[in-house]
Structures are given as C-alpha cells and as structure tokens.
C-alpha cells in the first residue's frame, strides 16, 4: 500500500479528482452490466414460443402470470398486449407500442454518460498535467541548484501520472460504452422483433381462440342460443 500512497501523493489534487470520477464510472458500468445480465436479459424467441403455446391452449391467465414472473422489457410489452387481447388487434398493437415507448428509456439510460465521462477524465488529467508543470517551473525559480533536479523530477512525475491516469480511465469508459451499447441495441432489437411477431401471431389467429373464449362466455343474443325464448325449437 506504500506505493499507492506514494502515487496519490505524487499525482496531486487532480489525480484525486479523477479517482472520484473513476468510482462513478465503475458504478455506472456495474449497474448497467447487472441490468443487461439480469433484469433486462430474456430470450425473446423462447418467451414468445411459451406464450404461443399458452394462447393455443386458451390459457391467457397463465400467459399473464408468465409475463409477471420477470421484469424484462419484453415481458412487460407482452403483458400489455395480453391485457388488451379482448379488445382486438388494434388495441393490442397500441398497448404494446405505448409500453415499448416507456421501456426504451430504461434500456438506454446512463450508457451515454460513459462517453461524457471519458471526455471529462481526459480533460481532468490534462489539467493535472498542466498545473503540475506550471507548479514545477514556478518552484524552480526559487530553488537551490542542488534541489532543482528533485523538484523537476517530482513535477514531471505529477504531470505524467495525471496524463496516464486520465487516459486509462477514458479507455475504460470507451470500451464499456462500446460493449454496453451493443447490449442495449440487442435488447432494443429483440423488443421490436418480439412486438412484431406477437402482432403477427394475433393476426394469424393465435390469440383469437383465447379472446373468443371470453366473448363466448357472454349470454347469446339470437333465438337459437336461448332455449328459454324458443321452447319449441322453431324459428
């Protein structure tokens, strides 16, 4: 730990500032990684197949419970469509589109901040470099010749530490931004594809039986379906 203390001492105030920014960067990366590996991760194709089988068996309630079992955006979009299943395809499409609009900001949030942090830590490192050199040359004016080498060495070390530290954090930010952006695009693509396939499933009649079961439970309106109104069975 002595070397770490020595690095912070040589790095100066802007080195400490960049350490604070590094903590923020790590927090952003960990939070987004946990989201895409946990709550935001779901196999959309397998999930759609499960819903398709449940709808084919007229089991809408089971399909809704399946959606409630996970907080993934795909499940929320599916649940919104299932809740409007009895209102027709147009209502289902509208509900799914509205839910997608609400879910997309959750998927994309804080990823762009990593690119901004890359610029911030780079500039902070450059500030540390410049101030280190300024302090060094200012101190050399009033320093004994025997101490000039030591002062110059310390000032250059502060400048180089800040430059290297800022660029290293910026590199981490850029790599994390690249990976998390790819994960975000994959989730958005799965979400859009799932919504389209679910609408096509309903258009092909996959949800017609499930919706018709609810409608069929209502009392009949014509004479043939109401024996009490037509006891002789004749029109």
Image (tube, grey):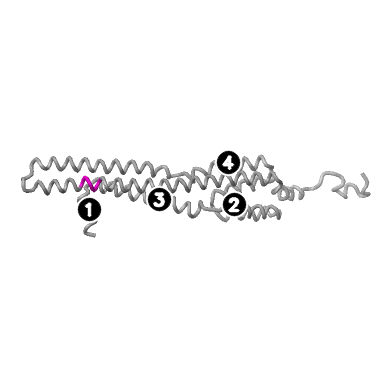
**Which residues lie in the magenta part?**
158-162
Closer to the eye: label 4 or 2:
2
Closer to the eye: label 3 or 2:
2
Residue where numbered disc 2 is placed? 45
Question: With 82 as the anchor, is 31 left or right in this view?
Answer: left
Residue where numbered disc 3 is placed? 29
Crowding at mark 4 (Cα within 10 Å: few <14, some 14-19, many 20+): few
Q: Residue at x 31, y 44 (%)?
A: 121
Near-viewer residue (20 or 133): 133
Residue where numbered disc 1 is placed? 7
Q: Earlier in the sequence, mark 4 or mark 3?
A: 3
Real-space Cα separation, disc 3 to disc 2, in angstroms: 27 Å
The quarter holding residue 117 reads top left
Question: With 230 as the anchor, is 25 left or right in this view?
Answer: left
Real-space Cα separation, disc 4 to disc 2, in angstroms: 21 Å
Closer to the eye: label 4 or 3:
3
Residue where numbered disc 4 is placed? 98
Q: Position of residue 200 (x, y in %)?
A: 66, 44
Q: Residue at x 25, y 41 (%)?
A: 127
């Amino acid at each position: 730990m002595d070397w770490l203390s020595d690095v912070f001492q040589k790095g100066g105030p802007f080195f400490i500032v960049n350490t604070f920014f590094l903590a923020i960067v790590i927090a952003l990366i960990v939070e987004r990684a946990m989201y895409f590996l946990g709550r935001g991760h779901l196999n959309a194709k397998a999930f759609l197949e499960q819903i398709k089988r449940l709808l084919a068996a007229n089991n809408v309630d089971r399909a809704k419970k399946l959606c409630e079992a996970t907080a993934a955006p795909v499940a929320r979009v599916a649940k919104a469509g299932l809740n409007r299943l009895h209102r027709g395809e147009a209502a289902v499409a509208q509900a799914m589109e509205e839910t997608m609009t609400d879910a997309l900001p959750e998927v994309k949030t804080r990823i762009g901040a990593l690119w901004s942090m890359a610029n911030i830590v780079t500039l902070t490192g450059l500030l540390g470099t410049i101030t280190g050199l300024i302090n060094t040359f200012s101190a050399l004016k009033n320093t004994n010749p025997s101490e000039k080498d030591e002062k110059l060495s310390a000032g250059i070390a502060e400048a180089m530490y800040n430059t290297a530290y800022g660029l290293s954090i910026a590199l981490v930010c850029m790599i994390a931004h690249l990976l998390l952006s790819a994960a975000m695009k994959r989730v958005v693509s799965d979400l859009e594809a799932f919504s389209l396939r679910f609408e096509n499933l309903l258009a092909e009649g996959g949800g017609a039986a499930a919706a018709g079961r609810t409608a069929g439970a209502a009392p009949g309106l014509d004479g043939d379906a109401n024996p009490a109104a037509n006891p002789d069975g004749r029109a």
